[in-house]
Every structure is written in structure tokens, then in C-alpha cells.
Amino acid sequence: IRELRNTKYRPRTSVLGSRQQFCVHPEVSKLRGAAQNTQCQKLVGANACKFHNKTQGHKAEHPEVLTDMMDIEDLGVHGNKHTVCPYYLTRDTAGDADIVFMPYNYLTDPGSRRSLSYLWADSVVIFD
């Protein structure tokens, strides 16, 4: 993202990452691995996560999440400032982005790849 910021090109971008990288919930963010994933899913399933609950419609109110070329740190700051979940927000914005950045294992792991299948139609994949 840093290199892209140095160009004149201003595509809509999204950065995918793990809950561990993105979680801003004060309690869940302290957990790691399966414990974090389970607690996150439990709260989301019960509509008990105030960060996730504000994700729906956030990109319409805050188009900068697509246009400002935010990296993981920027998204964390944005999530805290607006009480919105960066993990779920980036999954929501990925379908509208011109460029989606993600760890390579999201492409090589069959489970991850399937969960993001909506991104692959008419796409170009670049490994760096």
C-alpha cells in the first residue's frame, strides 16, 4: 500500500487480514488463535459485538475506507474511531475494491479461497 500511495493511481482498495490483525474489541483482541476466532464468532452470532453491529452500511457513510488506501494500522485506527470492526468491514469492502491486498495463504489455502470465492471472477492475481 505504501508504494501504491506514491503513485498518482487512486484505485479503491481493501486489505484483508486475520482477526488477530484487525480485532479492536477490547476483550477479544487480547485472545489469540482459535480462542479469538471462537469468541468473535460467538459475539457476532449473538449480535453482542458493538463493532460488528456497526459494520453494515459503514462503507456507504464512510467511502474513505475504499478510497484512502488504508493499511492494516489505518483500518485499526478507523475501527476504533468509528466503533466498527475492521475485520468484517474489509470483507464487506473487498467486493467493491479495484485492488484487494491479502496474505498469499488466502489464495493457497482451499478453505480461505472458498470463503472468498466472490472475489475471483474476472480477477487478476499478482503474487509479490
Image (cartoon, rainbow, N blue to C red):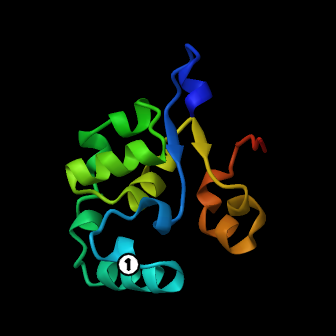
Residue 77, how many percent across, how many down? 32, 47
**In this rendering, position of residue 57 left or right of residue 12:** left
Q: Residue flagged by tag 1: what amino acid is it?
A: Cys
At horizontal 68% and vertical 61% (from top left) the residue drawn is 106
Q: Is residue 14 above or below residue 91?
A: above
Between 11 and 122, the one lying in front of the other is 11
Give the class, few, some or many, for how many residues have Cα within 10 Å of label 1's Cα (few <14, many ≥20). Answer: many
**In this rendering, position of residue 116 left or right of residue 65:** right
At horizontal 27% and vertical 70% (from top left) the residue drawn is 26
Residue 11, how many percent across, how many down? 53, 27
Residue 47, how many percent across, how many down? 24, 78
Q: Is residue 30 above or below residue 85?
A: below
Question: In the figure, residue 112 lies in which quadrant?
Answer: bottom right
Between 95 and 17, the one lying in front of the other is 17
Query: How many labels were placed on the picture?
Result: 1
Q: Which residue is mark 1?
A: 40
Q: Is residue 56 above or below residue 31?
A: above
Label 1: which secondary element: helix
At horizontal 52% and vertical 84% (from top left) the residue drawn is 34
Split into 4 quadrants, where in the image is the N terminus?
top right
Split into 4 quadrants, where in the image is the C terminus?
top right
At horizontal 39% and vertical 42% (from top left) the residue drawn is 74
Name, please, the residue furthest toward the top: 8
Q: Is residue 61 above or below residue 25?
A: above
